Structure formats: C-alpha cells, structure tokens
Amino acid sequence: MKDAQKKHAVLVVAADIEEIGSIVRALNRSDYDFITARSVPEALSNITYRLPNVIISEAELPEVDGFAFLEKIRKGIKTRLIPFVFITDSKGVKERVHAYQTGADAILVKPVNSEELHAVVASRIRLIEEFYHIAVTDELTRLYNRREFLRKFNEEIYREEKRCLSLALLDLDHFKQINDIHGHQMGDNVLMTFAEVIMSVCGDVYFPARFGGEEFVILFPGISSVDAKEIVERIRNIYGAISFQGDKKKVFYVNFSAGVAEYPHMAANLSYLLSKADHALYAAKNEGRGKTLIYSPLMGRNDRFWEYLKGSRETFLTKDNTDVVSRLPYLPGALEMITNLDFEIQSIGTMAISIRENPTITAVRGRQNLHYDIRNIVSVIMEACENNFASDTFYCRGSLFECDFVVLFPSIADFSFNLQKFKELCNDIFQSISRNPACGVFDLGYACDVMYFDRKKPWGLLDGVKRIMGEIHSSDIKRKKFEKLQRNARAIQRTPSQNKPLIETKYYFNTFNLHREYQYFVVSDGPEYVFELDILIENQIKKQAELFSKTIAKHTQREKELPSMVPWNGGIDLQEYIDMLAVHLKGRRMLLMINEAQITDKVRDTLIRTIRSFPPAISIGLDNCFIGPDLLNVLSSIECKALCFSENVIRNIHSFKERIKIVNGAKIFADQLGIPVLAKNIMHEEEYLIVRDLGIYYASGPYMEHLRKKGVINGHM
C-alpha cells in the first residue's frame, strides 16, 4: 500500500525571526510542514519530539554555531542521514569546504534564491527517499523488509486508531525440500514468483513484506480477519496453479500455510498480533499445511502449561540476571546499556515510579498474585510510554527491596531546554498508568527530572536516579480507604442492621447468553473500591461466624435458585462453618469457595476427610486460582464444582501470550475433570473476548454487567 501524500517536515534554524520568515516564504510550499528554532538547544529539543525530513540552518548561531550543530546531527543514530542545508553570509571558499567536510549536503549564500532553495530541498528529500527505499526493500523479491513493515504498522494504527486492520503470515510449505532437490536458484525463483503473485493481488491497497527466508507478511488496513483470509485464499488459488520445472524437467507445484490475526480485536499491539498470527500459522501447519486459519486462543501451544507447572522455580533472578517478576533488568544493567550506546547522549530524561502493595491483600491472595499484578502494571507502564513519548526508552527495576521502576529516555538533545514539556509528558504517562484497572488497590507515586550524561563520570547517573527516586511521594489514599472498609466490615459483625449498605450481591454471567449463573458477595464503598469478603472479614469471621452466615443468607433471598458462592479462609472449623450455613441457607445451593493461596496439606486432608459429610446442597469450589504448582494435585484429590481464576491472572490477559497458554492449559485440565471454569472481575472488552474464545463460560465484573444492561447477546446488540 503506497503512503498517502504527507507533508515533509522542514526544520529552519536561524537566530533572527525575520530570517526564519524569509526562508519559509522562499520555500512557500503547501507540502512542507515548518518547524522553527532560534538556537541549537531549541532545535535539538524539537528534534527529540519530531524528526525533520530536512534541516536548513544558518552557519552563524548564538551559543553553539551551525557547524557544531551539524556534528551532533551526524552522530545521532536517527538523525545522521537527515539532509542538512547551510545558509550563510560568507562567500569564502574556506567556510564552504569546512561545511562539506563536516557533512553538509549544500551551502547557499544569502540572499537565497527561492528557486535554488526549493530545488536543493526537493532533490535532497527525493534522494534520501530513494536511499531509504533501497534500505527497506528486500533485494531478491523487491518487497519491503521487516523493518519497513514494522514502521508501516505503527503508522496505520495511529492514523485511525478505531478502525481494524488484519495481518497475515504466509510460509511456503516444504521450502527446504525445494532447495535440497532442485537447488537454491530454483528456490529463489519460487520466492520471486510468490512475491509477484502477492503484489499482483495486493496492488496499492495492501502492504506485503518479506519477513525472512520463506516467510512473508501482509498488512490489511481496514480489513477484518475474515475478509483478509479470503484475499489470502485468492493468492493461494493463483500461486497454486503455477507450475515450476525442476531437474529433468520434473514439474512441481508449491503451496503455503497462513495465519491471520486482527487488530485490535485480538491484540493490542504489533508484538502480540504477530504472535497470534504465528499461532494460527503453526496450527495450519499442524493441520496438514496448505490452508489459512484465523487465530483462536485455543491455538496457543499447550505444552507451555506443563512447562510452567514443572519448570524451574526462579525466585529472585532469571538466568540472564533480570528481575524474575517483571522480567526487567535492574537499574545498573539498564545504565550499562545506555552508556554503551554508540551515539552521543547529552541528557537522559528520567521517570521513577513507585508501587506500594497492600500487605493484607497479599497475605490473603498470595504473593504469586502480587507477581501477576506487577507484570500487569509493567505492561501498562510500557504501553503508556510508547503512546506518549517518541524517544528511545529503557525500562528497569529501581531497587531490590522496593517495588520501584525507572524509565530512562536517553537523547542527543538537552531535555532541560524544554523541561516543562518533558514533565507534562511524564505526568500524562503517570495519569494513564494510574487510571488503568491493573493498578487495582496499589498506591502509586512518581517523580521525574533530567540527568546530564558525562561519559567520564558514568557513576553520576546512579546518584541522579537516586535523587529522583527520593523525590517520589506515594499516595496512601487507597490504603486508607481499605483500612476504612476493614473498620466498616467489623461494624457489620457488631451491628447487623448496618450491613445492608456495605454488602452487595454480584453475579457470574454466562459469557455467551449473559444469563445469571452464580451469585457472590462483596463489601463495597463506592464503585472503585470493591473487595470480596474473604479479604475484608478474614479476622472477624472466627468470632462472628454465625452472624456472618445469617448476613449471607439474607442476601440470597432474592435469587434463591442461583448457587451462592461463600468464602472460607480457615478462620473457623470447616465442619462447624458448614453446619451453620446449612441451617441458615435452608437447602439453597451453595459453593464453599476455598482460596488456592491458603490450601495447605492440612487443609486438603481436612477437605478430603469432611467433604463426604456435606449436605447435598453444599459443594466445594476453588477460588483465587492463580495456577500454582500444586493445582493439579488439588483438583485431582478434591471434588470441586467450580474453579474460579484469580482476577490477577485474567487482568490484561490479552497482553500476555504465555499467560493465555497457561490459562488455556488449566481450562483443558478442568474440562477433563468436568469442573466448570469461571473468570473473575472482567474489566475490558479485550479480556472478555479472550475469556470467551478460551471457552470459559462464566465471568463476572463491570464489563459483564455492562453487556447485560446493553442487552448484548453473542457479541451483538
């Protein structure tokens, strides 16, 4: 697909505002977008946020002259090829020679002739575009290469964020055999012919590229996955009819397998979209090759689930010395990478983010759930930075002892020249992070500033980051809110008449027809702060268990036909608790939900021993399932009537292909045992779609309630 006509950005740098105006008027072209600066620091600051196609600069500038400016431009990775045109008062040969030796593309003497200036700028833009085309084109097939494809994808999603686009991965079947039997020259012929067919079908509408070897990719802007599949099949019909003649005039035909995925329905960014298209391609290969499949989560390779359960349990560091939870390097490792960059760094924009956990919630739900939360938040931080900042970005853990993260933006420019803009961008990033549901009940804080980089004194960077981290002021609003809810929960036990405004009934809905299937109970004090009872009343239930069971009984009155999910966390003798609930619920169906984080060998033995004596209406369910290493033993030894995934596992699941495989594996195992599977607290459409595609039939949360209110059935209004 050819790019739409875009304006070329021209950076004009001159000390005098009138001189800038004269250059702009001299070009006077509607297809140019002008960026202006009156000094080198201002020009570098502008380049940090937008790369120009051409730079026009006076040689004589205040503070830093134009020659030093050009030297900086030629040292930067992203800036070294930008055409640079000097404007000067001097007619001397010496200065012109110096300009060309420094790396200038042209030097024009004032007063500048407008036609000459336009010709120089246009020719340099055309030349650099030709060089760029050569750099991003595959030499054999003449299709674009992987790098240009990645750029094109990002351009398309930002051009119109709400529209869909699809991606297809195509891989020639048995290509190695073609090379082995008929030779590499024939293999090249097969590849070139395939590329010609792809281009003939795609034309200027779609964007094909060679990803490497015999693998190709096509981008379909504005096209659904179903329609993209039809176009790929059109390519198959044409290519499959072409005959190739090998050694001894032996005729053979070539086919291919393909996988299709759709943005944003199936993935929120390119990495996951490619991964899902790859899963579909892998499934097509497994199903006999020569076909095109659209991605489904069930295509995730399930062996990852078993690897997860039996694999090595790294506790603090991975084998490559990154943090085992976030998968990020620690601060010294990130700084080491930055100091080894091969371009000049003048300053490093730095943002430090703190995340403070709630010890009470972690104690009840387990540290592994905290780890899921941290990974969720890391993905949110990365997405927020990518959406708000164009610079190179490095992420790292800030400390071994605290949950702090540091984001580093190294630049050839001086960030402090426009420090206010940098701080505004950091604030936008933080606001985007803090509003995300993945942050849950965490108290977050941040601080940002600019560090200057001196290669002779790299240790100063550690001091700089330490200073910035010391300026973080974490909010404790959520912690105080939680403590208030705990006090209210205690009041429930003392004064039954006050329990109605605090305890709410929630529901699990069928993910396909949105019928209510189960009811459960939460303690709520506003829509943002909803906690399940097992967290808030863990310490009170032993003393007030009977009063609590009466409270639950009252809330089951409206929906007597629905099974009620009631928490048990070991605060009271299991059999005693069952007897109380049996009396107060009077034969209504109930699932006693056991928290996976609190299942010890003793608890499992107790359940195995007592479950046979339960009343017929009372069953066991596994709650807060984070898929720990003992999960299979628990499910195999206890007769469970429901398995409810922890919301930490489901949160942002669309961003974690490995987690999808793990959840899918647990779901398949539960299906084999006939155990219904539930997903807790669905917040977003992406989470809902993944859960539904995985065949999880029951889910709760704000998004499910939203669908119910809108009357959405099977994804349609």
Image: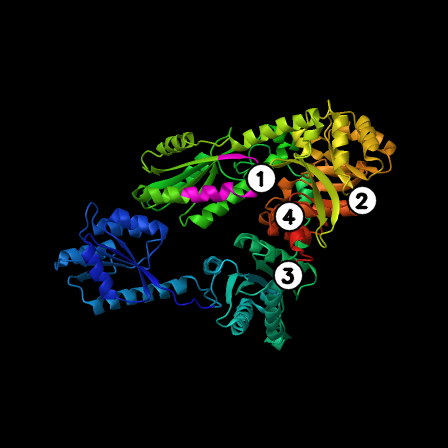
- Main structural element of the magenta stretch: helix, strand or loop? helix
The kind of residue on which mark 4 rests is Ile
CB contact under 8 Å: marks 3 and 1? no
Q: Callout 4: few (<14), some (14-19), or many (20+) C-alpha neighbours within 10 Å? A: many
Alpha carbon distance from label 3 to label 1: 37 Å
Crowdedness near tag 2: few (<14), some (14–19) or many (≥20) residues, C-alpha within 10 Å: few
In front here: 313 or 269?
269
Q: Which residue is mark 1?
A: 528
User: Secondary structure under badge 3?
Assistant: strand
Residue at numbered disc 2 = 561
Q: Using the image as rendered, state which of residue 595 and residue 301 is in the foreground.
A: 595
Spatial separation of the CA atoms under disc 2 and disc 1: 29 Å
Q: SS class of the residue under badge 4?
A: helix
Numbered label attached to residue 294: 3
Q: Answer with left or right where residue 39 lies relative to residue 389.
A: left
State whether residue 215 is above or below residue 16.
below
**Quadrant assignment, res 229:** bottom right
Q: Which residues are magenta?
A: 426-444
Pointers 2 and 1 in contact (CB under 8 A)? no
Q: Earlier in the sequence, mark 2 or mark 3?
A: 3
Q: Residue furthest front?
A: 497
Residue 684 lies, in percent from the top left, at 60, 49
- Observer-side mark, 2 or 3, equals 2
Q: Earlier in the sequence, mark 3 or mark 1?
A: 3
The circle drawn on residue 660 is 4
Q: What's the CA distance linking mark 1 and mark 4? A: 27 Å
- Taking the image as drawn, is residue 542 in sight? yes
User: Which quadrant of the figure contains the C terminus?
Assistant: bottom right
Q: CA distance from mark 2 to mark 3?
A: 40 Å
**Disc 2 or 4, which lies upstream in sequence?**
2
Q: Amino acid at mark 2?
A: Glu
